């Protein structure tokens, strides 16, 4: 089984994800943008049991603004590591956290909020696909 190692900005927190992600894509929501200070969040989704914190668990902080997202970061460097989505039963290990995984995005979510249109031909959901509790509505690029 493939294992993808990752770490925070300073390396105090190390994680690994095993197997293959359940899905990959981009989130354009204002929460991701505000928290990451980037125009878009590249996500890879994993079952919680596929993700392990292998070092520095005590340095892992968490901030939860909404019930959907427990955003986890390194308390030492402030680097972002991953976001747990309890209602979905999935963990987003940011694509940038595990660089050895070949990022193969399949979808854009919350595209109605985009500040960085990406004309790549992938499906663009206004919010989320139906199976993730969204409207399932798609919008034009
Ligand atoms: Zn760190
Ligand atoms: Zn988002």
Image: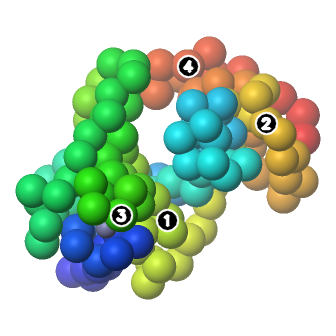
Would residue 80 be found to the left or right of residue 75 on screen?
right
Q: Which residue is mark 3?
A: 77
Mark 4–mark 3 contact, CB under 8 Å?
A: no
Sequence order check: which comes first, mark 1 or mark 4? 1
Q: Which mark is residue 114?
A: 2
Disc 1 and disc 4: Cα gap in Å? 22 Å
Disc 3 and disc 2: Cα gap in Å? 28 Å
Mark 1 element type: helix
Disc 4 and disc 3: Cα gap in Å? 34 Å
| Picture coordinates of residue 119, whole percent (x, y) | 89, 53
Sequence order check: which comes first, mark 4 or mark 2? 2
Mark 2 element type: loop
Name the colour scheme. rainbow
Query: Crowding near pointer 4: few (<14 within 10 Å), some, many (20+)?
Result: some
Can the viewer see residue 52 in this picture? no
Q: Which residue is mark 1?
A: 95
Q: Which residue is mark 4?
A: 134
Sequence order check: which comes first, mark 3 or mark 2? 3
Badge 3 residue CB within 8 Å of ligand 1? yes
Disc 3 and disc 1: Cα gap in Å? 18 Å
Nearest-to-viewer mark from 1 and 4: 1
Q: Which mark is residue 23?
A: none
Depth check, front residue: 131 or 40: 40
Query: Crowding near pointer 2: few (<14 within 10 Å), some, many (20+)?
Result: some
């Amino acid at each position: 089984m493939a294992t993808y190692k990752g770490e925070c900005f300073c390396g105090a927190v190390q994680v690994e994800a095993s197997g293959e992600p359940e899905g990959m894509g981009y989130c354009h929501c204002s929460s991701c943008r505000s928290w990451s200070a980037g125009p878009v969040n590249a996500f890879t989704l994993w079952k919680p049991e596929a993700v392990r914190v292998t070092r520095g668990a005590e340095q892992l902080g968490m901030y939860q603004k909404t019930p959907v997202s427990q955003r986890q970061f390194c308390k030492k460097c402030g680097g972002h590591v991953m976001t747990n989505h309890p209602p979905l039963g999935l963990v987003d290990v940011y694509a940038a956290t595990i660089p050895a995984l070949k990022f193969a995005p399949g979808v854009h979510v919350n595209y109605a909020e985009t500040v960085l249109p990406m004309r790549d031909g992938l499906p663009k959901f206004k919010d989320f696909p139906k199976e993730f509790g969204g409207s399932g509505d798609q919008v034009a690029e």
